Amino acid sequence: MFTEDGAQQPFSAAAGTHRADDRISPGKEGRGLQRLNPCSIIGSAMTKVSPSMLSADFSRLGEELLRVERAGADWIHIDVMDGMFVPNITVGPLVVKALRPLSRIVFDVHLMIEKPVRYVNAFADAGADILTVHTEAEGEIREAIKAIKDRGLRAGISLNPGTPFSAVEKYLDEVDVLLVMTVQPGFGGQSFREEGLPKITAAGRYAEECNPGLEISVDGGINRETGRRCAEAGATVLAAGSYLFRMDDMASEIALWKTFGKD
Ligand code: DX5
Ligand code: ZN
């Protein structure tokens, strides 16, 4: 949990609902809203949904953020690409900082960049809540995870479809989130790749035995059918871009997804 001055307290996986004392004080000048503490929704009984802003209308990002929040999303997934780790380039800390005052929703920032430790402070200052780095990225990944935790943020580790589960196992007692990629990172709108499912199952087993608070997130090609299958395999967070943003009624879709794996 976090105190009002933003200092991190021992983590409790049991909390499942938002309460006034779960909110992070703005802390930084210029933040108009108090933010939800990511811990407060870790361990929730429902599957969480983290819509990916990669599929939002970038000319109206602020409105899109509010649309997603109103639709009942738990987290918002922000994809950061550097043109090196992946062939695409998206957004950086400036965009995160611009969006931060608009909403207190948890900012789930997915760093698809080389040497991620270089940008931990910039994204922390910008208002990220969760920072996820890739095991395949150049640079000292353990150092990046430590830097994220030292800033009081939640840390995540991610792996690509071609990377075996054993490559991330060594980090799983240090992180709060495992992000299983079910497409090759870089672009939205690709088809779901099945290789992710056994990794989700293995992660679920690991979490049960060693780290019950671990969030198992899945990202890439998630739709109503693949989302349900991933949640049934043990995913606790569904990150989805193109499918959710195409929905006329995003709220009903998100409400349905929250029941996946629980019925
Ligand atoms: C891909 C990104 C994803 C992307 C998923 O590299 O990490 O978050 O937005 O998009 P969809 O849901 O369209 O596959
Ligand atoms: Zn992503």
Image (tube, rainbow, N blue to C red):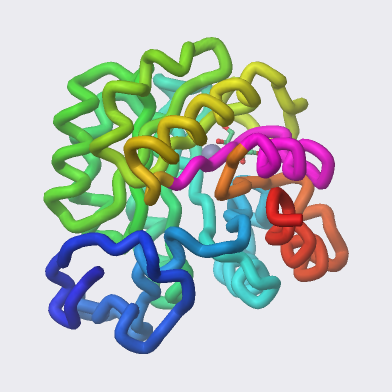
Whether residue 223 appears in magenta in the rendering, the answer is: yes
- Report the side of 94 relative to 140 (left or right): right
Q: Nearer the viewer, residue 208 or 254?
A: 208
Q: Position of residue 231 (x, y in %)?
A: 67, 43
* Figure quadrant of residue 197: top right
What residue lies at 71% left-to-right and 20% top-to-bottom?
Answer: 194
Q: How many marks?
A: 0
Q: Position of residue 203 (x, y in %)?
A: 48, 30
Question: As drawn, which residue projects farthest toward the right?
Answer: 248
Whether residue 207 appears in magenta in the rendering, the answer is: no
What residue lies at 51% left-to-right and 20% top-to-bottom?
Answer: 160
- What is the span of residues highlighted in magenta in the rendered image? 215-233
Q: Position of residue 9 (x, y in %)?
A: 16, 66
Q: Quadrant of the N terminus?
A: bottom left
Residue 84 visible from this viewpoint: yes
Q: Quadrant of the C terminus?
A: bottom right
Q: Is residue 129 above or below residue 115?
A: below
Question: As drawn, which residue projects farthest toward the front?
Answer: 209
Q: Is residue 45 above or below residue 56?
A: below
What residue lies at 75% left-to-right and 53% top-to-bottom?
Answer: 244
Q: Position of residue 112 (x, y in %)?
A: 42, 31
* Figure quadrant of residue 68: bottom right
Q: Nearer the viewer, residue 148 or 92?
A: 148
Residue 183 visible from this viewpoint: no
Q: Is residue 211 above or below residue 64?
A: above
- Report the side of 94 relative to 161 (left or right): left
Q: Quadrant of ligand 2?
A: top right
What residue lies at 23% left-to-right and 26% top-to-bottom?
Answer: 141
